[in-house]
Amino acid sequence: GDKIQARALASQSGVPVVRGSSNLTSSDECMGLLKNGDVNLPAIVKAAYGGGGRGMRIVRELSQVPSSFDSCQREALTAFGRDEVFLEEF
């Protein structure tokens, strides 16, 4: 299922969720959230669809954002047919 929509629904229903983002379209957008403190490191870039540990990259340093974002998005598209990704605190 769609983890981004599940997070939004849980939050709207008052269920506590880990700090994170909605759909991210670029590594620059991901970097901005981390630099602004909207999401703290360590964080994890996750595929919005799928599961089983695929399409997830742990980011411990800002320098890892571009490669982690790109590889997560590629793996999500290959494995699940969709490239939507989001960010959560790890």
Image (tube, rainbow, N blue to C red):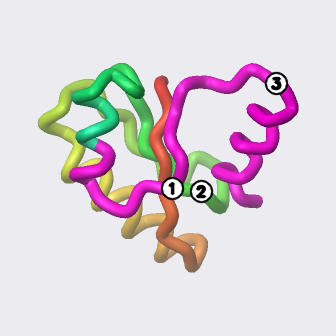
Of residue 38 and residue 17, the one placed in the foreground of this image is 38
- Dot 1 corresponds to which residue? 23
- Disc 2 element: loop
- Disc 3 element: loop
Instruction: Please say whether residue 42 is visible from this viewpoint.
Output: no
Q: Position of residue 55 (x, y in %)?
A: 49, 55
Q: Position of residue 51 (x, y in %)?
A: 66, 53
Above-or-below relation of 13 to 24? above
Q: Indicate which disc, 2 or 3, sits on the residue closer to the N terminus.
A: 3
Residue 20 lies in the magenta stretch: yes
Disc 1 to disc 3, how far (Cα)? Answer: 20 Å
Above-or-below relation of 81 to 89? below
| Amino acid type, callout 3 | Val
> What residue appears at the point 31 percent right and 53 percent down from the top-left corner?
69
Neighbour tally class for label 1: few under 14, some 14-19, many 20 plus, Cα within 10 Å: some
> What residue appears at the point 23 percent right and 29 percent down from the top-left corner?
35
7 to the left or right of 53: right
- CB under 8 Å between discs 2 and 1: yes
| Amino acid type, callout 1 | Asn
Q: Position of residue 1 (x, y in %)?
A: 76, 60
Instruction: Please say whether residue 65 is visible from this viewpoint.
Output: yes
Disc 2 to disc 3, how far (Cα)? Answer: 19 Å
- Dot 2 corresponds to which residue? 48
